[in-house]
Amino acid sequence: MVQNMFRTGFVVRAAHTVLTWVITITLFLHDTELRRCEERGELLLPALFFLLVVLSVLLYFTVSLKDPGFVLSDAQKDSQTWSEESEAMVPGPLTPQLRRCGFCLLQQPMRAKHCKTCGRCVRRFDHHCPWMENCVGEWNHRWFVVYLLVQLLALLWALHVALSGLSPSATWQQWLWLNGFLLAVLAVVGVFSVVAGLLLGCHLYLVSINSTTWEFMSHHRIQYLKNCREEDSPFDRGIFCNLWDFFCTCRTVTWEQVYQRNTADPV
């Protein structure tokens, strides 16, 4: 039973939710900027902070529970989808031969990879996130980046609020005792702020060149990237187009066609 709870991500998601609300309640109960605004009857800032925290939690569950783009088996595809995808996945003269997954035996679209943790192949696989307990792939990657942005804003605001609540004292012992909870909040929020900031910066860079974490880290082992320089991506269409397609295009992309178009006339 315990193994099943960990496998389904219940413990990780519960821990994230509990930690988020413990920190939020601590900031509201102590003599922080939020508490002082409430006492003065100025509810705009406390309400905005609360809504930002709620939004971050909702985005977390959106990414954690959303299908990242699992490759469907033959039995799961209807005849129309199977026909269209089969035709699109036929390798062209410039496309490396597509392969079947060695674990689930499905024919993998280009940029797909099998996740051993999830036991499924994922389209445009980026990575498996243990904190989300889900893969990040073609269908939830944009929400993952948006979540990182919102989470970072909430964490930085929480840092500011926690600092505003630190109270002076006559001795170090009294100061530590008086501010113990806020110091713990500062430590946790500080670590998560650094992690969220680094992740956001890395993913925005990868999005801007139309690459993924898996492709960037395993460039030399991926068949369709072996003939490209490490700093190049055969799917790169320029920063503006890459960002537009990533955040504004709501469809499954046939990467085989993008690959053939971009490699036919290399810059």
Image: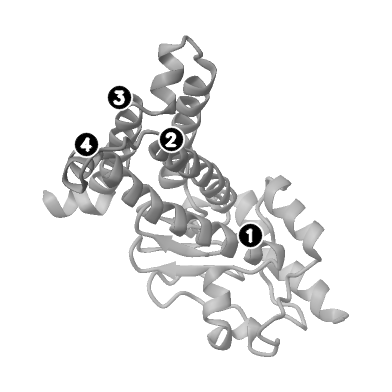
Structural distance between the alpha carbons of marks 1 and 3:
36 Å
Q: Residue furthest left?
A: 1
Q: Earlier in the sequence, mark 1 or mark 3?
A: 3
Pinpoint residue 149: horizontal percent, then vertical percent: 56, 47
Q: Which mark is residue 4?
A: none
> Helix, strand, or loop for circle 4?
helix
Q: Earlier in the sequence, mark 3 or mark 4?
A: 3
> What residue does disc 3 label?
29
Q: Nearer the viewer, residue 5 or 232?
A: 232
> What residue does disc 1 label?
204
Q: Amino acid at mark 4?
A: Leu
**Residue 33 location, quadrant:** top left
> What residue does disc 4 label?
178
Residue occupying image coordinates x 53% and y 42%: 153
Can residue 88 be seen in the rendering of this structure?
no
Pinpoint residue 97: horizontal percent, then vertical percent: 63, 82
Q: Are marks 2 and 4 in contact (CB under 8 Å)?
A: no
Structural distance between the alpha carbons of marks 4 and 1:
40 Å
